[in-house]
């Protein structure tokens, strides 16, 4: 998928769940949103010109684009280059010569970083780097730190799910298995109508929830609301993946 689709789909999937808690936990809610946004683009640090390396996200227009590019996007290059040079390249090099030397692990797009192993490694190492920086700056808070790490991981996992809807697909268990999950969507602007529509639906729902929350029409303490939207999102994503993208499990790995 394009960078803008990864960002918007992941960001507003999370927003639908956390927006009702905005009035009670504004800083924590904002941190979760930022963590999801960063994580949603991190797996593409294995690609030369990915959105995670730029301070502005292409294709996100209007007030939404101004908000994202002004508030969150300036952080992307920091995490993009950190992931590429302090996580991705070292991990592939070390794993390829030690624990995974019997596997064909190499630097390529939709390889290591687009797997459970890659996301787990990126989460651990990024968490260590973030902890050290925050500790040295005397800014460390366990609650905020864990909120960011979990959000970051969730965003990265959503990225893998979103890529599984495309023709190339995702090899979740790379390099241990050649099975991949792929769909019918093509990663080009001219063929992105389905992703655009789904993203727009999530944006609209999150926007409505935000205004209802500001007007205090949604009781943030009601766990039933959260459960309802969890089920609702699972249903939406199932429809998108199964009936729109037509995802399927195939054998043969990802062709590069």
Image (tube, rainbow, N blue to C red):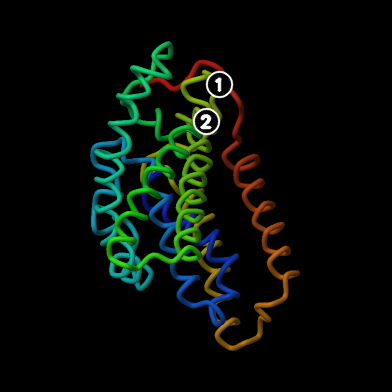
* Viewer-proximal residue among 109 and 87: 87
The answer to whether 195 is drawn above or below residue 229 in the figure is: above
Disc 2: which residue: 172
Asked if residue 30 lies left or right of residue 126, the reply is right
Q: Which mark identifies residue 215?
A: none
* Viewer-proximal residue among 193 and 54: 54
Quadrant, the C terminus: top left
Secondary structure type for disc 2: loop
Image-quadrant location for residue 233: bottom right
Secondary structure type for disc 1: loop
Asked if residue 155 lies left or right of residue 57, the reply is right
Residue 253: give x, y in percent of width and height: 48, 19
* Viewer-proximal residue among 152 and 114: 152
Residue 216: give x, y in percent of width and height: 62, 87
Residue 213: give x, y in percent of width and height: 59, 81
Pointer 1 or 2: first along the chain: 2
Residue in the picture at 24% in, 41% down: 49
Residue neighbourhood size for the residue with mark 2, other residues' Cα within 10 Å, grouped as few (<14), some (14–19), many (≥20): many
Disc 1: which residue: 179
Residue in the picture at 29% in, 36% down: 47
Asked if residue 68 lies left or right of residue 23, the reply is left
Q: Is the residue under label 2 in contact with that under label 1 (CB below 8 Å)?
A: yes
Quadrant, the N terminus: top left
Image-quadrant location for residue 168: top left
Residue in the picture at 48% in, 25% down: 174
């Amino acid at each position: 998928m394009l960078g803008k689709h990864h960002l918007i789909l992941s960001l507003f999937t999370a927003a639908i769940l956390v927006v009702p808690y905005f009035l009670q936990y504004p800083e924590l809610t904002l941190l979760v949103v930022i963590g999801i946004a960063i994580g949603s683009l991190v797996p593409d640090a294995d690609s030369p010109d990915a959105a995670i390396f730029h301070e502005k996200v292409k294709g996100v227009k209007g007030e939404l684009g101004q908000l994202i590019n002004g508030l969150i996007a300036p952080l992307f290059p920091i995490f993009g280059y950190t992931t590429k040079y302090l996580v991705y390249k070292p991990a592939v090099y070390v794993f390829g010569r030690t624990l995974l030397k019997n596997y064909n692990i190499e630097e390529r797009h939709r390889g290591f970083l687009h797997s459970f192993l890659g996301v787990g490694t990126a989460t651990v190492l990024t968490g260590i780097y973030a902890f050290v920086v925050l500790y040295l700056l005397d800014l460390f808070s366990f609650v905020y730190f864990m909120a960011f790490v979990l959000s970051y991981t969730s965003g990265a996992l959503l990225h893998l799910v979103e890529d599984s809807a495309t023709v190339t697909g995702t090899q979740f268990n790379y390099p241990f298995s050649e099975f991949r999950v792929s769909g019918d969507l093509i990663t080009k602007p001219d063929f992105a109508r389905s992703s655009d529509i789904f993203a727009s639906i999530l944006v609209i729902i999150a926007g409505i929830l935000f205004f209802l929350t500001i007007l205090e029409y949604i009781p943030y303490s009601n766990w039933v609301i959260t459960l309802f939207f969890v089920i609702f999102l699972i249903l939406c994503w199932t429809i998108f993946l199964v009936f729109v993208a037509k995802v399927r499990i195939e054998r043969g790995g990802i062709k590069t």
